[in-house]
Image: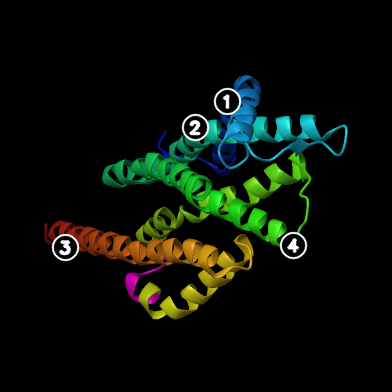
Amino acid sequence: MSHKDMTIYEHIGELRKRLVFAVVFFFIATVISFFLAEPLIVYLQKADEAKELTMNAFRLTDPIKIYMQFAFLIAFVLTSPFLLYQLWSFISPGLYEKERRVTLSYIPISVFLFITGIAFSYFVLFPFVVEFMTRVANRLDINQVIGINEYFQFLFQLTIPFGLLFQLPVIIMFLTRLGIVTPMFLSKIRKYSYFVLLVIAAFITPPELLSHMMVTVPLLLLYEVSIIISRVSYKKVLEAEEKYEQEYSQNEEK
């Protein structure tokens, strides 16, 4: 039975099977992440950005809270490619063969961009922000007492949004393929998009011009790259539609 011939109940059953696979894989990844969380936490505390800071636990539950958060975050990162593959497996029977290959390529690209965004925010932006905050505290003659929970919450707040924002080119490419957006539309709303990205950058960074620009410039470049990708995808969509119309016309003539 083809995907198009399946009933609504069979579609729901297929979706449930995919969700079960994803939950089982997430459980396995969580077990693995329990062994990875501790060395990762220790490494981050000994990194250049944190080695001069003394970490403190203000609540008895702070260490276990941080440990569990890292475990689930690692599990999510490990599961995300498998989860995206299950989503692709669910929708792929309704796609043409070429569309299946194209959409399947989105998975490694999406994972790569997420890791790139995390790496950029941690190795480039985060050290600058920590240094800026420390410099302000020293100028004000404030003795900083760093809570481990607050430190890592701030780290998550700064890095994870960047990993998600770096998904913009993939999202634009996917929406263009679906015909929801076009490069002309993206160019038309460029100034509004720039404003939204400026606001997002202001929420992520401290109130300091240089750090704000360090976030804003990559986001604006990402948007411009997304427009270029949208143009390429839109051209391929038009070519596919033209080819389909030619084949349809030939079949009608026969």
Instruction: Identify the residue position indicated by label 2 in the image.
Output: 82
Sooner in the amino-acid sequence: mark 2 or mark 3: 2
What range of the chain is rendered magenta? 179-185
Which one is in front in this view, the residue at disc 4 or the one at disc 1?
4
Q: Secondary structure at mark 1?
A: helix
- Which secondary structure lies at badge 3? helix
Going by the numbered disc 4, the residue's amino acid type is Leu
Mark toward the viewer: 3 or 4 = 4
**Can residue 189 be seen in this snapshot?**
no
Cα separation between marks 3 and 1: 47 Å
Q: Secondary structure at mark 2?
A: helix
- Residue that badge 1 annotates: 25
Toward the viewer: 34 or 24? 34
- Do residues under tags 3 and 1 come within 8 Å of each other at their CB atoms? no
Q: Is 230 situated above or below 8?
A: below
Q: Nearer the viewer, residue 82 or 218?
A: 218
Label 3 close to label 4 by CB (< 8 Å): no
Q: Position of residue 74 (x, y in %)?
A: 59, 32
Q: Is residue 50 magenta?
A: no
Q: In the rendered structure, which disc, 1 or 2, sits on the residue that comes first in sequence?
A: 1
- Say which label, 4 or 2, has the lower sequence index: 2
Q: Amino acid at mark 2?
A: Phe
Please state the total of marks drawn on the protein image: 4
Give the residue number, with chain letter if any, for mark 4. 140
Which badge, 3 or 4, comes first in the chain's sequence?
4
Single out the mark in the foreground, 2 or 3: 2
Q: What is the three-letter code of the residue carrying label 3?
A: Ser
